Image: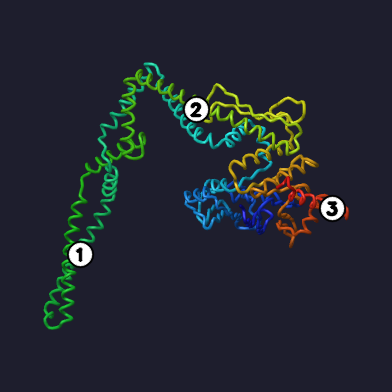
């Protein structure tokens, strides 16, 4: 269940907080008050796409935060696996947008937008106007049917995708093997040349790094030798050198060391320093000897590096990758040597994979046919309750000749919305209002399948009024008994059925327009209903009408039918 929404600096909203309740939560407001911004803020916190232009003018960032509560062990386990465990069943999803950056957090842990979206899909389902229209696309029908049958279809669809991918790769391999003799000879010749080129190089792992270090050392040798020579001059060979001066100092201290304890201690330190300087001189001499090299050594290192870098440009950025490329070419050569045999074997493997894919397609088809019958019957029941008279609703599941990652089925919703009319494709006869009711029926059926705790309906009242609106309000109230429903509406029939009613208002303060959201008290809900019913002028008759609607809604929710 969604407990709390906090929005800051998003479009017209400077800062708003809402505590949602169980059951049916209704949000109303004047056109342009910011209802779409509210849905946008939720979409933002759930990891969806959001324009950075929505950041409030003059603000550095926009923030949206949702707080959920759940005790569902399935959801809690999923969050554990995401690395963001819930504490006492409380789940916090937040997203902050500033400039070109977007920071998503799940229970305080920074996560990607895709992870936030994955977590949100377990908690909430947002249904908006674009989903009505998606029903006009037959691909959506297949998605809905598979979602309905997910317990049976889940594993089958995973196997379908794996087997389809295996078939695709085998087809590509067979195409690679489908070449004439001249093409085979040309490829063999190229592979042999490349293998010879790599083999003759005699590459050793780590060789390039050692060569580059040696090459840099030789390239900078003159400067290094000049510096080392100057150091040796100062330390050992100059007149006077550091070694000579320290030697004199040692002799002076040795003469008095027996006469004074402090002088004896200092003499010991100076002797250590003299010994260290002698060791340093020997190391310096050895290093200078190592720095000596011939022009031939330098040229040989340069040529070897050029050879290695040439191979890297052709076969891979590292020596291990070049050697791996050689292995791949060796395997390809072996394959080309017995091309007919490999072609026959790959063809056999492809036929076997296609047979397995076909078997999975048939299995998926059988599952879908059974599920289509059940879903069709449930849809008829739901649509009847939504004021479709003598509705007929069927789901056609047809086999096609071409299998895909989802099988070979073509799924289409067919409906007859009026008595005597034949069944026709949904996209050809449904109006906007009918589409919204059909989607509400689908959401009702699917909600019973997955039991998502919170469902949001935006513009579910598109194209409906009168008795139909009343039936939709009753359906929302029924859904609100088993899960939390949040609905943005323009219709009084829906608003009257609210368990909790919120008003979205737009106002201007100090020349700045901003949107606020607040929960209405009992009397205020009646006044808001009157505003929806009566428009600009709210008369006593309109108020009486609003009270009557509230009374009828209360009677329905306390009736035996509702219980």
Q: Which residue shows up at 27% across the image and 39% down it?
A: 304
Q: How many marks?
A: 3
Q: Residue furthest front?
A: 560
Q: Secondary structure at mark 2?
A: helix
Q: Residue furthest bottom?
A: 259
Compared with residue 74, is residue 395 higher up or lower down, i.e. above or below? above
Q: Secondary structure at mark 1?
A: helix
Q: Residues within 10 Å of mark 2 (few under 14, many from 20)?
A: many
Q: Which residue shows up at 59% across the image and 32% down it?
A: 371
Q: Give the foreground label among 2 and 1.
A: 2
Q: CA distance from mark 2 to mark 3?
A: 62 Å
Compared with residue 558, is residue 301 higher up or lower down, i.e. above or below? above
- Side of 342 where 51 appears, left or right: right
- 512 vs 213, nearest the viewer: 512
**Residue 541: percent from left, percent from top:** 88, 53
Report the residue marked by disc 1. 235
- Side of 401 where 257 appears, left or right: left
Mark 2 touches mark 3? (CB < 8 Å): no
- 502 vs 253, nearest the viewer: 502
Q: Secondary structure at mark 3?
A: loop
- 359 vs 456, nearest the viewer: 359
Q: For residue 68, which quarter of the picture?
A: bottom right
Residue 101 appears in view: no
**Residue 247: percent from left, percent from top:** 15, 71
**Residue 16: percent from left, percent from top:** 66, 58
Mark 2 or mark 3, which has the lower sequence index?
2
Numbered tag placed on residue 536 in the rendering: 3
**Residue 551: percent from left, percent from top:** 80, 52
Report the residue marked by disc 2. 360
Q: Residues within 10 Å of mark 3 (few under 14, many from 20)?
A: few
Q: Give the foreground label among 2 and 3.
A: 2
Residue 532 appears in view: yes
């Amino acid at each position: 269940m969604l407990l709390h929404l906090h929005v800051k600096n998003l479009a017209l909203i400077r800062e708003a907080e809402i505590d949602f309740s169980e059951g049916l939560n209704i949000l109303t407001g004047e056109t342009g008050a910011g209802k779409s911004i509210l849905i946008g803020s939720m979409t933002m916190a759930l990891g969806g796409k959001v324009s950075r232009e929505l950041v409030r003018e003059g603000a550095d960032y926009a923030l949206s935060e949702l707080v959920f509560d759940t005790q569902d062990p399935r959801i809690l386990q999923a969050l554990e696996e995401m690395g963001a465990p819930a504490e006492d069943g409380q789940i916090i999803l937040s997203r902050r947008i500033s400039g070109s950056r977007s920071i998503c957090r799940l229970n305080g842990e920074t996560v990607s937008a895709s992870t936030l979206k994955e977590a949100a899909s377990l908690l909430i389902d947002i249904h908006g106007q674009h989903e009505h229209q998606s029903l006009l696309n037959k691909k959506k029908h297949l998605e809905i049917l598979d979602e309905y049958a997910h317990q049976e279809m889940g594993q089958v669809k995973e196997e379908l995708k794996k087997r389809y991918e295996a078939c695709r790769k085998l087809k590509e391999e067979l195409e690679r093997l489908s070449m004439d003799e001249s093409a085979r000879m040309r490829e063999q010749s190229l592979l042999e040349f490349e293998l010879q080129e790599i083999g003759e190089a005699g590459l050793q792992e780590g060789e390039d790094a050692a060569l580059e270090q040696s090459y840099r050392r030789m390239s900078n040798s003159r400067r290094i030798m000049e510096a080392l020579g100057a150091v040796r001059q100062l330390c050992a060979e100059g007149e006077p050198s550091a070694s000579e001066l320290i030697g004199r100092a040692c002799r002076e201290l040795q003469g008095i060391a027996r006469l004074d304890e402090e002088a004896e201690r200092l003499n010991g330190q100076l002797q250590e320093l003299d010994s260290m300087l002698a060791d340093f001189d020997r190391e310096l001499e050895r290093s200078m000897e190592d720095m000596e090299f011939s022009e031939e050594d330098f040229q040989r290192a340069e040529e070897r590096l050029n050879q290695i870098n040439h191979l890297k440009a052709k076969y891979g950025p590292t020596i291990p990758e070049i050697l791996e490329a050689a292995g791949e070419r060796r395997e390809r050569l072996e394959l080309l040597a017995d091309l007919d045999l490999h072609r026959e074997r790959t063809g056999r493997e492809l036929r076997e994979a296609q047979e397995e894919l076909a078997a999975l397609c048939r299995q998926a088809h059988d599952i879908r046919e059974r599920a289509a019958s059940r879903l069709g019957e449930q849809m008829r029941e739901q649509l009847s309750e939504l004021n479709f008279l003598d509705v007929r609703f069927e789901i056609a599941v047809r086999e096609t000749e071409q299998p895909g990652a989802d099988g070979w089925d073509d799924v289409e919703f067919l409906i007859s919305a009026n008595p005597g009319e034949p069944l026709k494709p949904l996209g050809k006869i449904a109006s906007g209002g009918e589409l919204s009711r059909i989607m509400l029926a689908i959401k009702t059926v699917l909600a019973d399948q997955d039991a998502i705790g919170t469902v949001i309906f935006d513009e579910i009242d598109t194209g409906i009024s009168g008795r139909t609106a009343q039936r939709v309000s009753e359906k929302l109230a029924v859904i609100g008994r088993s899960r939390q429903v949040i609905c943005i509406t323009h219709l009084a029939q829906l608003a009257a059925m609210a368990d909790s009613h919120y008003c979205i208002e737009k106002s201007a303060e100090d020349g700045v327009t901003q949107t606020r959201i607040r929960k209405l008290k009992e009397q205020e809900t009646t006044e808001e209903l009157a505003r929806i019913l009566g428009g600009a002028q709210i008369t006593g008759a309109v108020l009486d009408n609003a009270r009557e609607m509230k009374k009828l809604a209360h009677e329905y929710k306390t009736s035996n039918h509702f219980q």
